[in-house]
């Protein structure tokens, strides 16, 4: 269950959404589509501390022997097994480096092709986990946009992304 990024890109890449559950960039479905409140200053301080630890780990991990990764806390483990998660597309687009003349993206899915504007696609989010489970039947990913309501119709079953 992989997704390929290809076409007019400098680096064609293959994405494996099954490992994104351990990625710090993931965001929960409710976080994006049902924001219940504005984060309190304490939450912002806590997030800043987490980012600082992540930075320190990235910079100094080379010096630690053996390298140590962040372990999951019990609450995080429970959250992974219960919630739905989305991953921003932008970091993967940045890594593949589309050429400057790219204007559109074609998504190859189980049900056919979908053509989107490249700038619009870059704002998207991939749903890769629903209720703590990877998307198997109509996966590996669904495309959502954060500026829409949760009732939007996602593009399902994306297998390849072709920049044109």
Image (spheres, grey):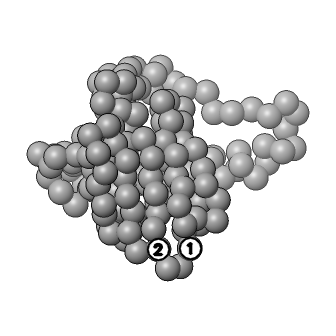
Viewer can see residue 124: yes
Above or below, 124 against 141 in this view is: below
Whole-percent x, y for residue 34 in the image: 19, 45
- Say few, some or many: other residues with alpha carbon within 10 Å of mark 1 (under 14 / 14 to 19 / 20 or more): some
Above or below, 18 against 97 in this view is: above
Q: How many marks?
A: 2
Whole-percent x, y for residue 73 in the image: 52, 24
According to the image, label 2 marks what residue? 102
Whole-percent x, y for residue 118 in the image: 38, 68
Q: Secondary structure at mark 1?
A: loop
Going 45% across and 47% down the picture, which residue do you hit? 160
Going 30% across and 30% down the picture, which residue do you hit? 138
Q: CA distance from mark 1 to mark 2?
A: 6 Å
Residue sitting nearer the eye, 147 or 11: 11
Q: Secondary structure at mark 2?
A: loop
Going 61% across and 55% down the picture, which residue do you hit? 12
**1 with respect to 119 (left or right):** right
Going 85% across and 30% down the picture, which residue do you hit? 66
The C terminus, quarter of image = bottom left
According to the image, label 1 marks what residue? 99
Whole-percent x, y for residue 88 in the image: 42, 52
Instruction: Find out whether the residues at labels 1 and 2 contact each other: C-beta distance under 8 Å.
Output: yes
């Amino acid at each position: 269950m992989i997704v390929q990024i290809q076409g007019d890109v400098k680096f064609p890449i293959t994405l494996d959404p099954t490992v994104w559950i351990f990625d710090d960039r993931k965001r929960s479905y409710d976080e994006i589509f049902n924001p219940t409140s504005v984060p309190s200053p304490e939450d912002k301080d806590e997030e800043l501390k987490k980012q600082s630890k992540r930075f320190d780990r990235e910079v100094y991990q080379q010096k630690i022997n053996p390298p140590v990764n962040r372990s999951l806390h019990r609450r995080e483990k429970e959250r992974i097994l219960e919630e739905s998660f989305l991953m921003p597309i932008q970091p993967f687009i940045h890594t593949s480096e589309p050429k400057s003349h790219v204007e559109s993206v074609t998504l190859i899915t189980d049900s056919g092709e979908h053509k989107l504007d490249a700038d619009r696609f870059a704002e998207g989010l991939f749903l890769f986990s629903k209720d703590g489970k990877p998307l198997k039947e109509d996966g590996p990913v669904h495309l959502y946009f954060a500026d829409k309501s949760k009732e939007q119709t996602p593009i399902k079953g994306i297998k390849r992304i072709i920049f044109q």
